[in-house]
Amino acid sequence: MIAIRLAALVLCAGLTTLGAPMARAAPRCRKSCRQEAARCGTTRCSTLRGKARRDCLETCRGISGCAPIRTLAYVVAQCHTDAGGLEVGRQALEIRRGDCDPVTVVTIGTEPVPDPLGLCRVYGQVRVGPLSVAVGGFQRLGVSPDGKGVVFEKSGDVALLHLPLASPQQPGFFFVRADGSGLRWLGPASRDPCFQLEPNRASVIGFDTNVFPTLPFSPDGRCVVFTDLGPGPDGETVQIVTLDVASGRRNQVTHLPKPASSIPGFPATSLAGFLDNETIGFYSFANPEGLNPEGQLTPFAVKIDGTKLRALPPPIAQPGSQVIPRFAVTGGRARLATLTLDGQPMNHGVGPTGFFNSVISEVFLLSGRDLLQLTKFDRVDTFGLFVDPTRHRAFFAASADPVGSNPTQNCQLFSIDTSGEHLRQVTHFREGNDSLGCAATTPPGCFVSGGFFSAREDVRTGTIVFDSSCDPFGTNPYGDQLFAIRSDGSRLSTLTHTKGFVEYPDGSVTTELTGIWDYGPYGR
């Protein structure tokens, strides 16, 4: 996860549910993207011939958002501040399948409230949509492995501004079918926030934040896992909890003691996910059963019934190296990890704020007890994302120029063989000549898979879904959108079309960004 300045944590106050779940979608969905692509082709490409026409039509397809995706769930977060400083906000959970128009499941909004700090403006300028979790509303989100359902959490109790939701539907975890039907309450919301704060003297308000909004399913789709407060041997602290999607039955898996120490701004226990249907992996600073006597950030594994808790050996590339805890280690036999290394980074001073802004980060492949270094860019902003379903290629974000096609050192998506050969630059974004690389939450430059550094590859089509503030088609000048691209770098498409940050002549401001999201089915 990337550290982002708390001054960006904005959306709205006094959240209330305005919209009800939509009725079951019609058997034949509307596909506006195809109409938009045809309209664009007629307007922009009619006078072109040959390759120029083919390229123009491909751009039109990309702008329209037509892409071979399956189930994509995401939040659209919006706020508006008028010239008098009154702010109105809105969050909407939307689900999209294939080329069909998205279905709006639940809408949350506010009445006008004062905005003396101009937080709506700052939220738009930083353009990291998932930061909307800090003001309440939608908190965690997950798509089932078969893509047929979505579980989401709605809460205001853990909001940064402590503004509870006033809603006909109580806060909590909910299930909804991918077509927008069958909305039902599963249980109460977690009391452990999915974001954490840390002091930062350089920020406007004085804090950075890390966001952890994923809600992982078990491979069989029966359960989701998350963190919540629960009893331990020395009092209440953060524990691992599962929730049965069919029955709503909640089970506290761990009974961890309170940790003696932690990294500021990083949760005591986090990054829980299923290793298989019966086993959960997570990170913690706690020392259960004497397994972590030094109180370091340690990976653990435990059975879903709470038995067979064990500490896993962390990957160590060299003495003093450590896993960057803001980024989850992907599951499976071949896994990616981002580790810090000693040395002076080439782009020192432009990395993420906080704990890792002055250390080198590189991507490593873990296979059993073997550790293979895949990158050597000597930069602060190289981050592993995932290994493809065939376990042949690893994907990562970086601002380096290893193949001579990224001269502006913009943040890009790369891939490499899991043997460390055949490096490929997948995206070719260019946001000016003075890019800040993958640290660029504000211009110049842009980020790829920012906010909580996540990307998903469809196991069937090889389509990668990721979020980015880059503007490849001239339609995202100051925003944060979801994109789809083939693993070979072809068929780039914009999946969302939020407004981004817009300032009007009268001084009013509108910010509309893509917030938390998940995609499925995808390669694990």
Image: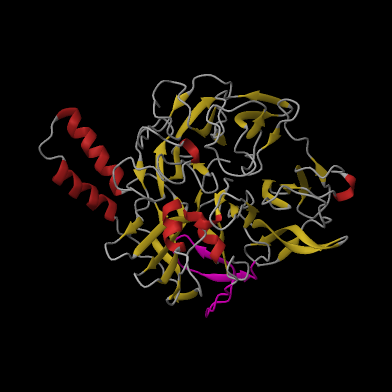
Q: Is residue 339 left or right of residue 262?
A: left
Say whether residue 20 is visible: no
When asked about the image quadrant of residue 32, the answer is bottom left
Identify the residue at image location x=75%, y=43%: 297
Vertical side of 375 occupied by 38: above or below: below
When asked about the image quadrant of residue 225, the answer is bottom right
Q: Is residue 430 left or right of residue 327?
A: left
Q: Is residue 188 magenta?
A: yes
Vertical side of 60 occupied by 248: above or below: below
Q: Is residue 49 magenta?
A: no
Identify the residue at image location x=58%, y=76%: 170
Vertical side of 147 occupied by 228: above or below: below
Q: Position of residue 65 (x, y in %)?
A: 32, 48
Residue stretch in magenta: 163-189
Q: Position of residue 268 (x, y in %)?
A: 74, 53
Comparing 373 with 51, the one in front is 373
